[in-house]
Image (cartoon, grey):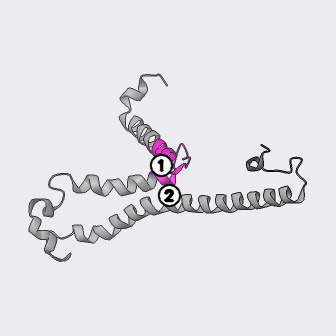
């Protein structure tokens, strides 16, 4: 493949750019490394942003043209967007909750590990005799 082929294949370049930006955001925000292809975190972001893109396109839903339809029930003509809202909320919730839960679990395990290391280190220091019996605050005058 030539180096100019990526200029003609815009979809592949767009997917690569989306994945790179997503990987940078995940690395900076959550310290999570993403896979180069088929990463679930990138998929969560795509699933969450797609409804936003679809709903902001002019004419995609009648509620954009007639705001009074936001008060109509979902079975009413033009109220189909209300049927999609629970799925959109689920995608957005998944995008927000799963990485935060991963970080919480890692922090909990890291603090548990750190606490055990410090406790073991403290026990070891207490059991050995220090060559310097006085503390630094008790220096001779």
Question: Residue 92 or 134: which is nearer the viewer?
Answer: 134
Q: Is residue 25 magenta?
A: yes
Which quadrant would the C terminus be assigned to in this image? top right
Question: Residue 135 or 68: which is nearer the viewer?
Answer: 135
- Classify residue 85 as left or right of residue 139: left
Mark 1: secondary structure: helix
Q: Which residue is mark 1?
A: 29
Question: Residue placed at 51% from the left, 49% from the top?
Answer: 38
Question: Residue placed at 19% from the left, 77% from the top?
Answer: 75
Please say if the residues under marks 2 and 1 sit with CB atoms less than 8 Å apart.
Answer: yes
Q: Which residue is mark 2?
A: 99
Residue 129: x and y in percent read: 91, 54
Query: What's the magenta region?
Result: 22-42
Q: Is residue 125 magenta?
A: no
Q: Residues within 10 Å of mark 1 (few under 14, many from 20)?
A: few
- Classify residue 128 as left or right of residue 3: right
Residue 71 lies, with reference to residue 112, above or below; the image says below
Mark 2: secondary structure: helix
Earlier residue among tags 2 and 1: 1
- Classify residue 128 as left or right of residue 56: right
Q: Where on the picture, by quarter, is residue 5?
A: top left
Residue 13: x and y in percent read: 41, 35
**Disc 2 vs disc 1: which is toward the camera?**
1
Q: Residues within 10 Å of mark 2 (few under 14, many from 20)?
A: some
Residue 99 lies, with reference to residue 74, above or below; the image says above
Question: Residue 24 or 114: which is nearer the viewer?
Answer: 114
Question: Residue 3 or 71: which is nearer the viewer?
Answer: 71
Circle number at residue 94: none
- Classify residue 29 as left or right of residue 83: right
Residue 4 lies, with reference to residue 28, above or below; the image says above
């Amino acid at each position: 493949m030539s180096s100019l082929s990526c200029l003609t294949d815009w979809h592949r370049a767009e997917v690569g750019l989306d994945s790179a930006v997503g990987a940078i955001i995940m690395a900076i925000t959550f310290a999570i490394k993403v896979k180069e292809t088929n990463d679930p975190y990138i998929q969560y972001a795509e699933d969450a942003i797609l409804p936003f893109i679809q709903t902001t396109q002019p004419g995609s839903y009648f509620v954009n043209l007639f705001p009074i339809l936001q008060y109509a029930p979902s079975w009413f003509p033009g109220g189909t967007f209300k049927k999609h809202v629970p799925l959109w909320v689920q995608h957005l919730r998944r995008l927000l909750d799963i990485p935060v839960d991963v970080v919480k679990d890692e922090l909990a395990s890291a603090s548990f590990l750190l606490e055990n290391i410090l406790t073991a280190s403290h026990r070891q220091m207490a059991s050995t005799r220090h060559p310097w019996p006085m503390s630094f605050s008790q220096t001779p005058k």
